[in-house]
Amino acid sequence: MSTSTLNNSSAESFTQAVDHFRELYGNHLPAQKSLQADAAAVFIQLGIPTTKHEEWKYTSLAVLAKNTYRSVNPSDNCSLSKSDVASLALTNDTLLYVIENGKFNASASNANALPKGITVGSLAEMAGDARVQAHLMKHADFSDESLVALNTALTFDGIVIIADAKTECATPIQIAVVNNTAGEALNIPVRILVIAEKNAIVNVTETHHSFGSKSPVLVNVVSEVVIAEQARVNYIKLQDEDQNTCHVNYHKVNMARDSYQHISTLTWGGGLVRNNLNIRLDDVNCTSYLNGLTIAKDYQVIDHHTVVDHAMPNCYSNELYKGIIDGHAQGVFNGKIFVRKDAQKTNAFQSNKNVLLSDDASMNAKPQLEIFADDVKCSHGATTGQIDEEALFYLRARGIGEVSGRALLNHAFAADVIEQIPDENLKSALLDRLTARLNA
Amino acid sequence: MLSIKDLVASVEEKQILKGLNFEVKPGEVHAIMGPNGSGKSTLASVLAGREEYEVNSGSVTFNGEDLLEMSPEDRARAGIFLAFQYPVEIPGVSNANFLKTAVNEVRKSKGLEALDSKQFLKVMQEKMKLVEMDKTMTQRSVNEGFSGGEKKRNEIFQMAMLEPSLAILDETDSGLDIDALRIVSNGVNALRDGKRSFIVITHYQRLLDYIVPDHVHVLYKGRIVKSGPKELALELEEKGYDWIKEEVDSSVNA
């Protein structure tokens, strides 16, 4: 396909950006061929969203117009080895899989003892599998999401995790998503599919890192998480890339009856990070926790958009997002909760709290509740303030220096989000990384 | 130990302390009493180093050093402790973690090695007994959800942990019932060792039945207008402050 056909973007500056994604779609996965073609057409039609788009009002992707991004493809080779990525493992027992520039890197992965009933593999190899075909690209709707369409069109690999019915895997399965550049700006599609079958329990951690020359990259992640009846999925996203990374992440969860999901999105790296979390409570008695943390400094832009969609009765959702914004950084939180007409007895709660550490830091928070049922309990609250000077003085009056005092207060504020993580080992590993990030 | 000379201080451009003179020697317990608005809490705040209080003139030296030049943390490290009238709640920071950080920063400033978790725990368990603290209070976030009495006990507990040479108790008795008052006072008395000094700021004489001072001073309109032995507190309890106000106001007008 020639790049000249990509000039449909509404804003002129982005026409150029779209132009920069040469080799737009590769038609890489035979089993998903028609979906990929549809997605390419959608992306060409929608283009890259501008700040005129309501959902992108505070987050400008203009940075993408600054570089010519080459889209990675199956002929790109992986170069990282086990020892290169060893430090990425969050815990000693983690089952570590590596996706390098969108490609499943089996030789860098380190997961010998996979529990019975758990399948983990390269998406390229498994895309034809019946269970994968049933779900891949079927949940993350790209019809009005141009970046999901871009990912769907370009996907050639990624990772699939399947927990068979009644399988309980307490050991964390970690997907280390690494961008590894060598001077060239890259457009990297990353695709993740997690299927928890009936009564399965699985613990997935998706971590993001930068290696190599730190060239500009667009990391475009789409995860589809399918949770069957009575299944439980604990999910963590840790975004810790360098500031040349533009990271867009679309995470779609589909929940069947009596299922449970807990997701924590911890963002403290990346130049521009946009998370779209879309949780659909599609049947009765679902429980969903969404927690998020932004720690931004310099000129970072970190944006969390969440949608919790209560479609059926007797479900519970609870959302806690916090942000610490320093320097010239910018935080965005947009939390939508839908309670559909049938979703009686819904309990849905949302809280967003932010601290601005400098005069140039900014935060835009927008809770949005749309309730069509009449017997529900919903609440939301959003606050943005400064560090508590009274608390700081109290610490100093006990001999704690101003710098340590500020760090202690910031840590306590942010740790609140990580404390919610059910797995004790992951919690303590992430608290350590939080400390390191706050002291950086 | 502490020497305050002609101290003039203001907050929000309003002069509160208007030439205060005051001397504390090692081991002494001084009570500062006075009617509302006389400047008692301002004095405590200036000594602890609250930034919103401006010192206009005068001097404060602590063990020969210029206290006013020191940051709040340096004052604490040098051995000054303020028990807050309104202790601050700090969600997410456990009492134990907070105190460990504080104790070790103070030790570091003295060139002492940091206490490890085991050593710290041992010291903490000893000091907890002083104010009848239970273990759960050390694990909870600093002052979060504490009752008025628990907050004040926590102040004295911190004092016991930090072992200051001069402790300033700012209306520690306010909001305490009789049992809490007894516990807090017992804690303070246990820390009277003949070397450690105390400035006990209070509106009521009641606290001084438990913490018996060596000297009592009356603060009025930003100055110490009367000093005397512990019996002065009893006289104030009986007669109120009006006779002192009259004395001062008539001498000013004369």
Image (spheres, helix red, strand yellow):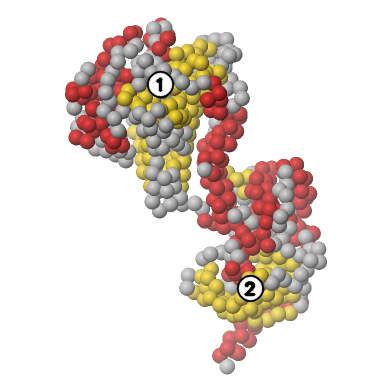
Q: Depth check: give the residue in front, A25 or A144.
A: A25
Tell me, yes or no, whether the two marked residues, 1 and 2, touch with CB atoms within 8 Å.
Answer: no
Work out whether disc 1 and disc 2 sit on a shared chain.
no
Q: Amino acid at mark 2?
A: Val
Residue at the front extreme of this rendering? A183
Mark 2, chain letter? B
Give SS at disc 2.
strand
Residue furthest out toward the bottom: B254
Q: Mark 2 Cα within 10 Å, few/some/many (few <14, many 20+)? A: many
According to the picture, the residue beneath numbered tag 1 turns out to be A102
Q: Chain of mark 1?
A: A
Tell me the tag on residue B60.
Answer: 2
Residue A61 image-quadrant placement:
top left
Task: Indicate the quadrant where residue A28 lies.
Answer: top left
Q: Amino acid at mark 1?
A: Gly
Quadrant where the N terminus of chain A is found in the figure: top left
Label 1 residue SS: loop
From mark 1 to mark 2, how far is it between C-alphas? 66 Å
The percent coordinates of residue A210 (x first, y second) are 45, 30
